[in-house]
Amino acid sequence: MPTIDAPTLERLTRDIFAARGVPGDDATWIATLLVRANLRGHDSHGVIRIPHYVRSMKSGDANPTPKIMIVVETPTVALIDGDRGFGQVVAKRGIALAIDKARAQGLAAVTLRNTNHVGRLADYAEMAAAEGLIGMLWVNARMALNVAPWGGAARRLGTNPHAVAVPGPDGAVAMSLDFATSVIAEGKLKVKLNRGERVAPGIMLNAAGQPSTDPREFYADPPGSLLTAGEHKGYGLSLAVEILAGILSGTGGARAEKGPVRNGTLMVCLDVQRFLPLPRFHEEVMALFGWVRSAPLASGAKEILIPGEPEARMEGERRVHGIPVEDETWRQIQECAAEVGVA
Amino acid sequence: MPTIDAPTLERLTRDIFAARGVPGDDATWIATLLVRANLRGHDSHGVIRIPHYVRSMKSGDANPTPKIMIVVETPTVALIDGDRGFGQVVAKRGIALAIDKARAQGLAAVTLRNTNHVGRLADYAEMAAAEGLIGMLWVNARMALNVAPWGGAARRLGTNPHAVAVPGPDGAVAMSLDFATSVIAEGKLKVKLNRGERVAPGIMLNAAGQPSTDPREFYADPPGSLLTAGEHKGYGLSLAVEILAGILSGTGGARAEKGPVRNGTLMVCLDVQRFLPLPRFHEEVMALFGWVRSAPLASGAKEILIPGEPEARMEGERRVHGIPVEDETWRQIQECAAEVGVA
């Protein structure tokens, strides 16, 4: 498995997209976020997506030069139509608008429709947090269904993630939470499948609706389904995500209909300073984290972490030692590069 | 175990509070919400609380005639100080303000501090939904800690619930989600303790940080702790609740300090009509629910429910057949009534 340093991977990624007509700044931004996902240990959202993104451009599902339009706009609310643009590009525009509005009004809600895969929600929530705001996102994926409703035995919902990022001092991010409402993300099942391993109980059902630990049953025909995190709780939150992110944005909720994957997105930014001075807020957040970390460890646990810490550590390590890329992924990326004459 | 009809229980509850100096409308409202919790099957949030509420008034922790003050107010944001009032009374004021602001501005955020127990969050979220808004709440309880952080073995967090209610047509509520970020609420452990039963694995740790199914270990000295729902996911959401509801409201996050329980609350209301016409929204929500319900049943499951349905069914049943009240709770309520000469 090759290990590639982050700047090299970013340059190659940018060049591939730029060569296919994505404007330079957008290509750089897409490359930054894809490689950032790898840096932070979420390889399922990293450069492994390049071949798929390239296919989306070829098929016309992804528009490299979208005319992003603000369809609805008030001082606190906006609805953005992404014109089939890359999710990273549309979401960057969306969060910038939400940040501006939240600064002016105390809070703001922006929805995005007609966009491709937006990637990791944490990235946008953290952009708000770096500006002293609390950033929250909800995202559905109406055509990428792999999760069973609680009590059900077939795929009816996406992994429907939710993210919350909290500001720290001097543009830092104090906490960054980003979780799928399913027990695990689909990508992790695929890794187990490829390795011929089983998963822990409580993660998936087979097509007959029985608990299964065999990823092959998930990918069988008829397929299995993922379970929701926290049983009925993750199910309820997943439905809320369908409504908040899918229906409010005009993307639509989960449904039987087939078509290209579109992420419906809701972003809410909240200005901490409307409620209390930022220095006091930072102090209280640090006190909370200190209190939580002061607990003795549970049997078998190594430490108590704050959401975002595992990612920060992984980034520190991978910035120094490089990003391991599976042979097959690396081969596909090089193929994408060769097709457009970059390397 | 006596079975009391709802109107009788409401009248008795109202009379107890009114006799102790709670203004008539407030006493009626507190009685309505306590009995509604019983009607909807959440007995832990129902009339079982009366003796505790009465004690809070006697000790001065609860102020029957609070001067509720709006400490911060902008067109979209407000921070309310409840002057130690009953949570039901302060939260009613808060959600009314959030609803008005969201109607005018598209969305609004209101925090509450210095309030007693607010009860079930669903009640306030549903008030927003009945007005065509999406209502969301987050609540912490800085001094009522019973949940371990993920990886930890001692109580550091409250059960920190989150609620989302979604409007249906004609003032109906299409979906009402209200869940603790712990695996189960503390009240359910107490029921098991009183019955001498064990709980399922995955719910609690003993004081040594080992998995336990014995509720006696939760209530021992040193005490056990509840686990978070969905492992690290519920833990992350619980921390977010501490920050959104506790710190933003000025109530404060979880901490070692002892004192009377205060609920810190954040309410956000979002006006659906800013994003799409209500009739289309209702149609899409119904289509989503239909799609989700169309899944075949998982092994052992009886049906696929929408959040809020179990409560609605229970209410239908208990409105007809009355509310069962445990002997000890009933005895304590009658004692509270006798103390102030009502019956």
Image (tube, coloured by chain):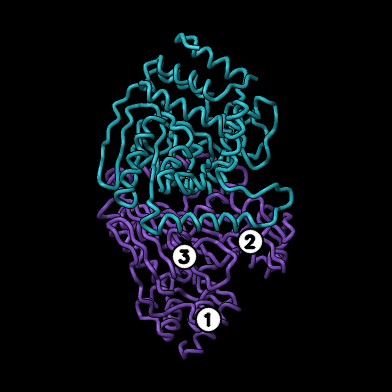
Chain colours: A cyan, B purple
Observer-side mark, 3 or 1, equals 3
Q: Position of residue A150 (x, y in %)?
A: 54, 46
Q: How many angstroms separate mark 3 from mark 1 (CA)?
A: 22 Å
Query: Could you say whether the residue bearing mark 3 is in a helix, strand or loop?
Result: loop
Q: Quadrant of residue B127?
A: bottom left
Query: Could you say whether the residue bearing mark 2 is in a helix, strand or loop?
Result: loop
Is label 2 in contact with label 1 (beta carbons under 8 Å)? no
Q: Is residue A151 something one can see in this rendering?
A: no
Front in this rendered view, residue B146 or A23: A23
Q: How many angstroms separate mark 2 from mark 1 (CA)?
A: 25 Å
Q: Earlier in the sequence, mark 3 or mark 1?
A: 1
Q: Is residue B257 above or below residue B19?
A: above
Query: Could you say whether the residue bearing mark 1 is in a helix, strand or loop?
Result: helix
Q: Residues within 10 Å of mark 1 (few under 14, many from 20)?
A: few
Q: Which residue is mark 3?
A: B251
Q: Which residue is mark 1?
A: B55
Q: Quadrant of residue B93?
A: bottom left
Observer-side mark, 2 or 3, equals 3
Q: Is residue A128 left or right of residue A213?
A: left
Front in this rendered view, residue B235 or A140: B235
Front in this rendered view, residue A75 or A84: A75
The chain under label 2 reads B
Q: Is residue A218 something one can see in this rendering?
A: yes
Under mark 3, the amino acid is Thr
